[in-house]
């Protein structure tokens, strides 16, 4: 059994917890949080080094910038780690830092997994390596963006809000048909906001304010619906998400090939947790094979994720 | 530059040839065939060992049972090889044989790549490793099946024929919605035959004969259209194909996740060649790293397929 520790108890930490309970090759050692929750299986993060011999892999479930960037370089001294660090601009520096620390301590870190970055990253790599002469496009949604929902909620006068990111179907059709489009994410997606206004605020003004939030909304086609808290709770409090990676290109004789990878997820954190745990299995094996350092999904051969032995994979999966 | 040799000059060999011409990190050393074609770049297969120092990787482009099973165990003594061996029942034994021979000779073999087996194999492995509690389904088509077309042509009274394999959309919808279906390939696909009858044969009888060819058609919902040779040549002589791997499953909280990988290919051999060449790059690197033996797509980390160096992958693909 692979002994897993969870760091952080937000949505992702909770999803990891329930998934490990159903696993037959992993067991939950405990969940580490900043506050002492005084419950079975919960530990203070400050005490984590006391348990370094009891845990094979830690799953870091905090936020990228506020938690992982700070926690991971310390934790890697005593633990193998898996994280879903997703601040794209900082991945390169974060990788270099973790690679050095992990090697120094004979530990193994898998950084930036999940579905994007993660499965989408490896699909982009397979697709462009196979179809050299082509273009890769990533679409997100339909799904709830936590960051954008929070940005709306931060407006004075907004009591609560959920934001959907929705890809434009006509863009998807065009790139699947091999049209060589150049566009930015804001051209190919629309944003739909469901918001609850506080009493006494002007809805037209609030709508204007939402649509002009820089980076989050100002460049996007955005629609805003004001609804009751009841309706928001009933219909828009799930965490669905998904997306597609599409690459189309021409082969030697001008024949078109289209590769599409698509995810439709009722629960974004549940699926991210599932990916994290599969990679925890891989990183556990890497460490046993004395492969120390930091890795990404691009370094891991598919067989490392599977519970099946190689003979079974040959017979059932090839 | 990676120096490639092609063994066999059918559809796949020709697609490899045109693709290598457009590559900037591979060059074609030559094409090896049984008959002496007396042209530049063509060599007799019997003389291939004379060129063992001039070729980095051989792509085996013959048929699985008649060519590859016989050629590969000899060629691996002097060459690194990539093949698309696709006789599922024999893959395990073929792997074991090639693994031993390759190790004995310090060579590297990548067996059974292409798209199925190949990319579909690795998607099946990723998908089931991530979504443990679910079902994987593979659909093929819409596309031309060479084997089934040949089976129709072998009937006395048939001058020419093309056969399309077509997946049933309602099965696809159901499995994407998480319905836990159990079915065989013959339930989920229909076969459509376009045939040219020879003069003097009874069309009703021919249709009956086609529909009762064992294994190929007898268990399938099959439709037969008799058309002119002109129309067959004009509309049904391409080699389109494709398919989908779909896995859907429930996560801890009964939330549904659906993973779909889909290929739509104007030319089956062009795309298979593209996959073979990406894996030729990987196997070239494996051999340089002294990774000897036989491998499948499940052993190869995504980064090995890419022309980009790792820093660039970190910055652009993650």
Image (spheres, coloured by chain):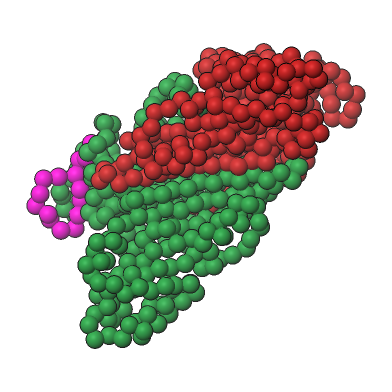
Chain colours: A red, B green
In the rendered image, residue A58, in percent from the top left (x then y), is placed at 70, 27
The magenta stretch is: B27-41
Position of B137 compared to B151: left or right? right
Q: Nearer the viewer, residue A99 or A199?
A: A199
The residue depicted at 51 percent of the width and 62 percent of the height is B168
The residue depicted at 52 percent of the width and 17 percent of the height is A89
With respect to residue A201, does B44 lie above or below?
below
**Residue A9 appears in the picture as rendered:** yes
With respect to residue A92, does A1 lie above or below?
below
The residue depicted at 42 percent of the width and 42 percent of the height is A176
Is residue B203 a member of the stretch shown in magenta?
no
Task: Give the residue at the far right of this rendering.
Answer: A38
The image quadrant of residue A196 is top right
The quadrant in which the N terminus of chain B is found is top left
The image quadrant of residue A164 is top right
In the rendered image, residue B185, in percent from the top left (x then y), is placed at 52, 64
Position of A151 compared to A251: left or right? right
The image quadrant of residue B225 is bottom left
Q: Nearer the viewer, residue B48 or A59?
A: A59
In the rendered image, residue A274, in percent from the top left (x then y), is placed at 66, 38
Position of A79 compared to A316: left or right? right
**Residue B83 appears in the picture as rendered:** no
With respect to residue B99, does B190 lie above or below?
below
In the rendered image, residue A125, in percent from the top left (x then y), is placed at 44, 33
Position of A24 compared to B293: left or right? right
The residue depicted at 52 percent of the width and 58 percent of the height is B169
Q: Nearer the viewer, residue A249 or A288?
A: A249
Is residue B40 a member of the stretch shown in magenta?
yes
Q: Nearer the viewer, residue A85 or B70?
A: A85
């Amino acid at each position: 059994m692979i002994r897993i520790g969870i760091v952080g108890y937000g949505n992702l930490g909770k999803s990891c917890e329930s998934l490990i309970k159903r696993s037959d090759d992993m067991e939950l050692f405990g969940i580490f949080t900043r506050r002492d929750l005084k419950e079975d299986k919960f530990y203070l993060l400050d005490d984590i080094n006391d348990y370094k011999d009891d845990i094979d892999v830690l799953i870091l479930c905090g936020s990228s910038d506020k938690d992982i960037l700070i926690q991971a370089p310390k934790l890697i001294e005593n633990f193998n780690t898996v994280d879903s660090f997703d601040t794209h601009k900082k991945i390169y520096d974060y990788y270099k830092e973790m690679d050095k620390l992990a090697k120094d301590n004979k530990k193994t870190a898998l950084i930036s997994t999940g579905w994007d970055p993660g499965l989408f990253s490896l699909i982009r790599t397979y697709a462009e390596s196979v179809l050299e002469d082509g273009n890769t496009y990533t679409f997100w949604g339909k799904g709830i963006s936590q960051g954008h929902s929070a940005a709306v909620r931060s407006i004075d006068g907004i009591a609560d809000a959920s934001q959907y990111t929705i890809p434009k179907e006509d863009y998807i059709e065009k790139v699947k048909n091999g049209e060589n489009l150049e566009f930015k994410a804001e051209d190919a997606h629309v944003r739909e906001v469901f918001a609850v206004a506080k009493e006494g605020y002007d809805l037209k003004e609030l709508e204007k304010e939402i649509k002009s939030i820089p980076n989050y909304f100002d460049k996007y086609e955005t629609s805003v619906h004001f609804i009751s808290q009841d309706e928001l709770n009933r219909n828009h409090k799930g965490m669905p998400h998904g997306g597609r990676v599409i690459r189309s290109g021409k082969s030697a004789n001008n024949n078109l090939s289209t590769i599409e990878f698509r995810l439709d997820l009722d629960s974004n954190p549940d699926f991210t947790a599932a990916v994290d745990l599969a990679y925890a299995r891989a990183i556990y094996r890497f460490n046993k094979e004395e492969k120390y350092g930091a890795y990404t999904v691009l370094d891991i051969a598919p067989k490392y994720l599977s519970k099946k032995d190689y003979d079974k994979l040959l017979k059932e999966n090839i």
